[in-house]
Image (cartoon, rainbow, N blue to C red):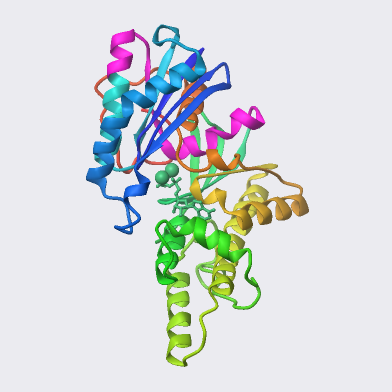
């Protein structure tokens, strides 16, 4: 079974091709370079870029895989969540291909794709596992019994996502957009114990209710206050120490709650995915704490953490071989696609 996956939820045009669980090609084009001067993604520019990049990226992926259009058995595409214009370009392309080739279409969930991609390098998932998806728009803990259709959301962020918090603090520290990778780099030269920033929803009266939830906006405010205080007193701002202390607060909470969910649900495996899972301290802390608690921690290689086509081809392949019915050719996109909906 050969599945072509199309990803256009945000600014990356990604095409991946998976055959029998093996990745044959993964090609990505991005319009990110255009956003540094705006300090964020401009949806209209992203949609236009997808239109320009779609066919060239598709051709490059087919060529790389040594596969012709006639060899494809199914088309998978991100149907949500994401930006409406970006999603629409990918879904339109996917429907056209499925119709022209007479093969099934699977409109799948981008966030579940961030976990599904891990199968390509590390093999099949266990019967039941906990997923931690940390990205530009999500920080969610999921209980996955079947990646092709049985996912429960245990908790998520009440305000900012992890990547979003990093990008906002990056702005406070005067770093280019997106701030995430810059804070990661700087934090490695800082002292993570120099400043202790607050952990959100750590205890208090909401402890039980928010067992698997996150809140990072208070932390972001604490960083802003800290910098203001230094400036008022005319003291030097030690950017690496702030980056390291801030990173520690976020990664401490993420790993602690995700591993707690593994213990609560009796799962021996934690799969971490999404753009923020590229963070070096998160990877280190998750591996270390997982080993301490006897939990197997799986995190994709760096290039499969941020958005790509391979993740959608991987999820499409899992859904296709599960025998579940394909999506109708009149599906639309869902900018807020619920996380327990793996495919339309
Ligand atoms: P979603 O998947 O929720 O729809 P998205 O697709 O926009 O959101 P991704 O592309 O998965 O998000 O991830 C992008 C985010 O990852 C950005 O916020 C970026 O700052 C962050 N990021 C990337 N690399 C790192 C890193 N090394 N450390 C911290 N954050 C990082
Ligand atoms: Fe993403
Ligand atoms: Mg992205």
- Percent coordinates x, y for residue 74 in the rendering: 42, 15
What residue is at 50 percent from the left and 68 percent from the top? Answer: 206
96 relative position to 154: left or right: left
Magenta-colored span: 96-124
What residue is at 72 percent from the left and 46 percent from the top? Answer: 295
Q: Quadrant of the C terminus?
A: top left
Camera-side residue of 201 and 66: 66
Question: In the image, is residue 86 part of the stretch drawn in magenta?
Answer: no
Camera-side residue of 55 and 299: 55
- Percent coordinates x, y for residue 47 in the rendering: 25, 38
What residue is at 45 percent from the left and 29 percent from the top? Answer: 27
What residue is at 42 percent from the left and 58 percent from the top? Answer: 164
Is 232 located above or below residue 95 in the figure? below
- Percent coordinates x, y for residue 128 in the rendering: 62, 35
Please count the marks in the image.
Answer: 0
- Percent coordinates x, y for residue 102 in the rendering: 33, 8
30 relative position to 261: left or right: left
Is 127 located above or below residue 240 in the figure? above
Q: Is residue 322 visible?
A: no
153 relative position to 194: left or right: left
Is 78 located above or below residue 194 in the figure? above
Q: Quadrant of the rendered structure where residue 124 is?
A: top right
Question: In the image, is residue 115 part of the stretch drawn in magenta?
Answer: yes
């Amino acid at each position: 079974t050969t599945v072509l996956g199309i990803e256009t939820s945000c600014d990356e045009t990604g095409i991946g091709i998976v055959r029998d669980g093996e990745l044959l090609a993964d090609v990505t084009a991005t319009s990110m370079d255009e956003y540094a001067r705006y300090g964020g993604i401009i949806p209209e520019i992203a949609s236009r870029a997808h239109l320009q990049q779609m066919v060239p990226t598709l051709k490059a992926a087919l060529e790389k895989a040594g596969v012709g259009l006639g060899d494809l058995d199914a088309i998978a595409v991100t149907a949500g969540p994401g930006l409406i214009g970006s999603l629409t370009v990918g879904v339109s392309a996917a429907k056209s291909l499925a119709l022209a080739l007479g093969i099934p279409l699977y409109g799948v969930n981008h966030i579940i794709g961030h976990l599904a991609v891990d199968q390509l390098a590390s093999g099949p998932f266990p019967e039941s596992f906990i997923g931690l998806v940390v990205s530009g728009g999500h920080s969610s803990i999921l209980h996955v019994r079947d990646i092709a259709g049985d996912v429960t959301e245990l908790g998520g962020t009440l305000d900012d996502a992890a990547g979003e918090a990093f990008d906002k603090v990056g702005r406070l520290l005067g770093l280019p957009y997106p701030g995430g990778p810059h804070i990661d780099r700087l934090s490695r030269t800082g002292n993570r114990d120099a400043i202790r920033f607050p952990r959100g929803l750590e205890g208090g009266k909401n402890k039980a209710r928010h067992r698997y939830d996150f809140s990072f906006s208070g932390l972001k405010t604490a960083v802003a206050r800290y910098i203001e205080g230094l400036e008022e007193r005319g003291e030097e701002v030690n950017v690496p120490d702030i980056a390291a202390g801030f990173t520690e607060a976020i990664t401490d909470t993420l790993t602690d709650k995700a591993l707690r969910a593994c213990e609560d649900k009796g799962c021996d495996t934690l799969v971490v995915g999404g753009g923020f899972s590229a963070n070096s301290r998160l990877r280190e802390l998750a591996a270390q704490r997982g080993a301490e608690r006897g939990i197997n921690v799986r995190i994709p290689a760096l290039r499969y953490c941020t958005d790509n086509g391979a993740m959608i081809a991987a999820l499409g392949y899992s859904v296709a071989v599960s025998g579940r019915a394909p999506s109708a050719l009149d599906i639309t996109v869902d900018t807020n696609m619920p996380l327990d909906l793996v495919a339309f």
